[in-house]
Amino acid sequence: MGRSESIRSELQEKGIRFVQADLREEESVVHACAGQDVVFHCGEMSSPWGQYREFHAVDVEGTGHVVDGCRKQNVRRLIHISTPSIYFDYRDRGGISDSEPLPVKQVIAYVPTKLLELRQTRYWRRGG
């Protein structure tokens, strides 16, 4: 699922199902989940600048639509791919695990929404 016409054509030429939709449109997202055993979710609004409400609408609410779509369509597994940006603290780092402490202050408005998104997908794993 995505919004890009050019990527749509490229994927369809390879036999990959593509649904043109926006994560902010719940009905479209639920429809895209229909008939799927597994959903890979890596959609986001990623930018070094922007307003928090825009990030929230795509990253948090959009991920909520994916989680709801998976539940409503009885998707067996949701695989969520997020970002290492949540660990950024102005220094080079490698080999960070997901149990690493998070920085107290986030650098840009994008990061707090990715943290909220992460909580939503962890809730999915617990079957809540």
Image (cartoon, helix red, strand yellow):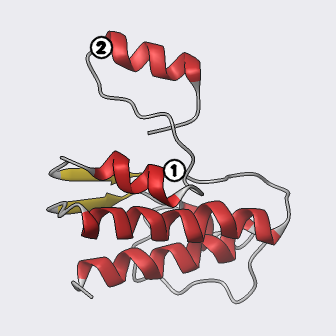
Q: Secondary structure at mark 2?
A: loop
Q: Nearer the viewer, residue 47 or 21?
A: 21
Numbered label attached to residue 116: none
Quadrant of residue 119 within the rendered picture: bottom left
124 over 26 or under it: above or below? below
> Crowdedness of circle 1 by 10 Å Cα count: few (<14), some, many (20+)?
some
Q: Nearer the viewer, residue 96 or 27?
A: 27
Q: In this rendering, does residue 64 appear at all?
A: yes
> Crowdedness of circle 2 by 10 Å Cα count: few (<14), some, many (20+)?
few
Picture quarter with the N terminus: top left
Numbered label attached to residue 14: 2
Tell me where residue 20 appears, x and y as whole percent: 49, 34
Left/right placement of residue 107 relative to residue 42 reads: right
The residue sitting at 85% across, 57% down in the picture is 49
Name the amino acid type tagged 2: Lys
Q: Secondary structure at mark 1?
A: loop
41 over 67 or under it: above or below? above
Tell me where residue 128 appears, x and y as whole percent: 27, 88
The residue sitting at 38% across, 30% down in the picture is 18
Tell me where residue 16 appears, x and y as whole percent: 29, 24
Dot placed on the residue nearer the N-terminal end, 1 or 2: 2
Q: In this rendering, does residue 108 appear at all?
A: no
The residue sitting at 23% across, 60% down in the picture is 73
Q: Are marks 1 and 2 in contact (CB under 8 Å)?
A: no
- Farthest residue toward the top? 13
Q: Nearer the viewer, residue 103 or 42?
A: 42
Q: Which residue is mark 1?
A: 43
